[in-house]
Image (cartoon, rainbow, N blue to C red):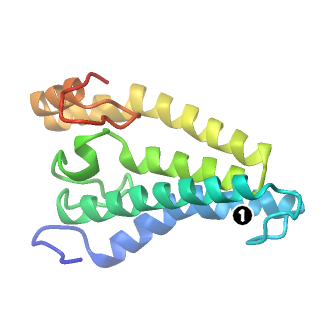
């Protein structure tokens, strides 16, 4: 990645990635599995291969979305996923042209994939709780702050791009 003038430092990016995405999508699920007696990185033998295969695909898609989003935040938005160093520019390109929250959408897809791989209702419950908490946070805190920061540009973006489910195709969608 090339850091643009006026953008965040590389150390700020590393802290932002470690503090939030890595913790929510990897460390907490791994800790939850370990507490439940799962052998990490080894699905239980009774898990159906179709669950492992479909979960792996979902986890990889979600991981791609999350990594792509972090890269876009850093390069285009000149910020990080961390609330203390958010993007300073409204991002409308890449996955942000399809959903307003591609990192979290990708993270939830990744968590669902992990739940399938390990056949774990606990991980599925974590994914659901994570989604509900973030939905409430975005509706009542994040979006009002973005409207203040970016004004009518963000209001127009909200009208054109859905909040969670990615828009497919070329048409405009409401979110």
Left or right placement of residue 136 versus residue 128 in this view = left
Name the one closer to the observer, 118 or 16. 118
Residue shown at the point (63%, 54%) measured from the top left: 55
Residue 144 x %, y %? 30, 28
Residue 91 x %, y %? 19, 48
Within 10 Å of disc 1 (Cα), the crowding (few <14, some 14-19, many 20+) is: some
Residue 44 x %, y %? 85, 63
Name the one closer to the observer, 135 or 19. 135
Find residue 164 and report its image quarter. Answer: top left
The quadrant of the image that shows the N terminus is bottom left
Residue shown at the point (48%, 31%) measured from the top left: 135
Residue shown at the point (25%, 64%) measured from the top left: 74
The quadrant of the image that shows the C terminus is top left
Q: How many marks?
A: 1
Position of residue 61 relative to residue 122, above or below, is below
Find residue 147 and report its image quarter. Answer: top left
The secondary element bearing badge 1 is classed as helix
Left or right placement of residue 117 versus residue 103 in this view = right
Left or right placement of residue 151 versus residue 81 in this view = left
Residue 133 x %, y %? 56, 35
Kindly identify which residue carries mark 1.
30
Find residue 155 and report its image quarter. Answer: top left
């Amino acid at each position: 990645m090339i850091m643009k003038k006026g953008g965040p430092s590389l150390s700020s990016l590393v802290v932002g990635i470690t503090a939030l995405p890595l913790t929510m999508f990897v460390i907490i699920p791994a800790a939850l599995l370990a507490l439940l007696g799962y052998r990490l990185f080894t699905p239980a033998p009774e898990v159906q291969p179709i669950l492992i295969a479909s979960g792996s695909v979902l986890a990889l898609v979600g991981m791609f979305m999350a990594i792509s989003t972090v890269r876009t935040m850093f390069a285009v938005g000149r910020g990080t996923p961390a609330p203390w160093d958010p993007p300073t520019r409204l991002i409308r390109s890449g996955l942000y042209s399809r959903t307003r929250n591609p990192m979290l959408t990708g993270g939830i897809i990744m968590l669902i994939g992990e739940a399938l791989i390990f056949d774990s209702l606990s991980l599925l419950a974590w994914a659901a709780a994570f989604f509900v908490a973030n939905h409430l946070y975005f509706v009542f805190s994040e979006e009002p702050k973005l409207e203040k920061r970016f004004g009518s540009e963000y209001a127009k973006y909200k009208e054109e791009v859905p909040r969670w489910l990615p828009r497919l195709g070329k048409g405009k969608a409401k979110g």
